[in-house]
Amino acid sequence: MNSSTSQRHPLKKAFENPFFQKISIYMLLFFFLQFLIFQLSGAVRSTFYSITQALLPTTETTVEIRNIIISGLQDMNELTTTQMSTKATVDFKEERKFFDRIPLGDTHVVYEAVGTVQAGIDLDQLDVKKIDVANHQVRLILPPPRIMKAFLDVEGSHVVIHFRRWFGRSVESDLQERAQREALAVIKKEVCANNILDNANQHAKKLVENILHSAGYEKVIVDTQPPGINACRV
């Protein structure tokens, strides 16, 4: 009995040592903190990834959305959604002078033009804000609408009045080109006053929504932007 007690005594004495007890507590705390940090780091990584995916869609996904829309438009990067045709009449005079002082004559031209203006958006500037593939949701912002193309119907446009006095010039090509430029400017101004850009915005929004719905996205949010200052310039 005494021998057994004497053998256990040094081990018991070691456990009762304050220094040994402190070391044991520190080691337990160390392993516990390591385990806690590992668990938290995984959760943090997962949370950060989820937030990143929700708020900052990858370039690949943005390109994928753009490609879906372009494919639905038969590979067109420029989406023309609205077209307006109208008429314009321009009336101008040109004087001819000798040495810019002595009148030699003048030319009076009235030109009636028929023109068409097309408006839409540039899909290369499409801004995808949020993509949730798992829940089939997407939110994007369309670029501002602008005039995409404006042209005259040359066959339907013509000079209705040409009056030349004295040595005024006849209606040569440069005078007719001037009349066409002025008429086209009047046509663009008129269709812009008739809200062609607002119509282009709404038609583009509806068209993009339909394409993405057909691609499998159940919730599609399409935001539009107002036309820029130079939106009516070609």
Image (cartoon, rainbow, N blue to C red):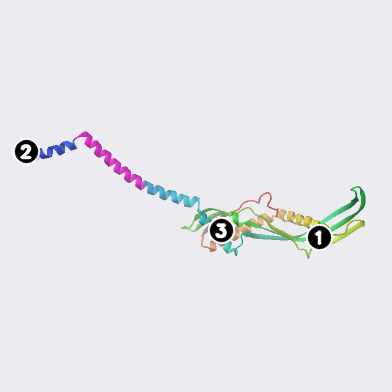
How many callouts does the rendering have?
3
Tell me: residue 157, above or below residue 40.
below
Sequence-wise, the earlier of marks 3 and 1 is 3
Tell me: residue 162, above or below residue 230.
below
Sequence-wise, the earlier of marks 1 and 2 is 2
Q: Quadrant of residue 145?
A: bottom right
* Residue 66 disc label: 3
Which segment is the magenta one? 17-39
Q: Which residue is denoted by mark 2 in the rendering?
A: 2
The chief SS type of the magenta part is helix
Label 2 crowd bin: few (<14), some (14–19), many (20+), radius 10 Å: few
Q: Quadrant of residue 142?
A: bottom right
Tell me: residue 214, above or below residue 139.
below
Residue placed most toward the observer, 137 or 74: 74
Is 149 left or right of 217, judged from the image as shown? right
* Residue 112 disc label: 1
Residue placed most toward the observer, 101 or 74: 101
Residue placed most toward the observer, 132 or 98: 98
